[in-house]
Amino acid sequence: MSAVANPATVAECLRMGAGFSQGDRAWIVEQFATLDARLASFHADSTELELSVKDREARGQKVTLECWIAGRQKIVTTSTEEDLKAALHDCRDDLRRRLNDSKTRQEPRNNKHIREMAQPVPAQPTVDGDADPVRSDAETA
């Protein structure tokens, strides 16, 4: 994996949406600190997070965390946990899982198009000069 010059962090990329104030920001950044390791592989200038809550502290509250990363599909995680802290953790953990899944889909072993574009490594010749020892066994059998 190549190093990113300006890695994304929650503190740098998080916007507070409806239901949250800037006063909540420090506490929320602390709750989302474990996302920093996952976000570090993306550029900060091409990564955005937005957190919002509907009906905060009410029985039917809904917390939504949206993530935009350039070149990838938007990821939206939600939680209807009644406890705000539990809802934040639920959204955070779901986002981490979905970022991992997205990253895995981008890797060559799981992406047929990228895998086919990779250059094949030529086989090393064996002692008898045959390039494929399995094939030579099959031919002599």
Image: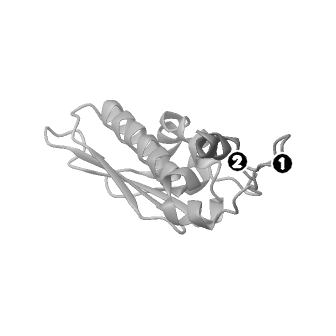
- Toward the left, the furthest residue is 59
- Residue appearing at x 13%, y 37% in the figure: 59
Q: Is residue 133 or residue 40 the one in the foreground?
A: 133
Residue 31 visible in rendering: yes
Asked if residue 24 can be seen in this view, the reply is no
Residue highlighted by disc 2: 132
Q: CA distance from mark 2 to mark 1?
A: 9 Å
Q: Position of residue 10 (x, y in %)?
A: 56, 47
Disc 2, disc 1: CB below 8 Å? no
Residue occupying the point 21% across, 40% down: 80
The residue type indicated by label 2 comes to Asp
Q: Nearer the viewer, residue 75 or 16?
A: 75
| Residue 41 falls left or right of residue 10 | right
Q: Amino acid at mark 1?
A: Gly
- Please state if 65 lies on the left or on the right of 48 as rendered: left
Side of 17 where 56 appears, left or right: left
Q: What colour scheme does the image use?
A: one colour
The residue pinned by badge 1 equals 129
Residue 128 x %, y %: 83, 43
Q: Secondary structure at mark 2?
A: loop
In the rendered image, residue 77, in percent from the top left (x then y), is placed at: 33, 49
Q: SS class of the residue under badge 1?
A: loop
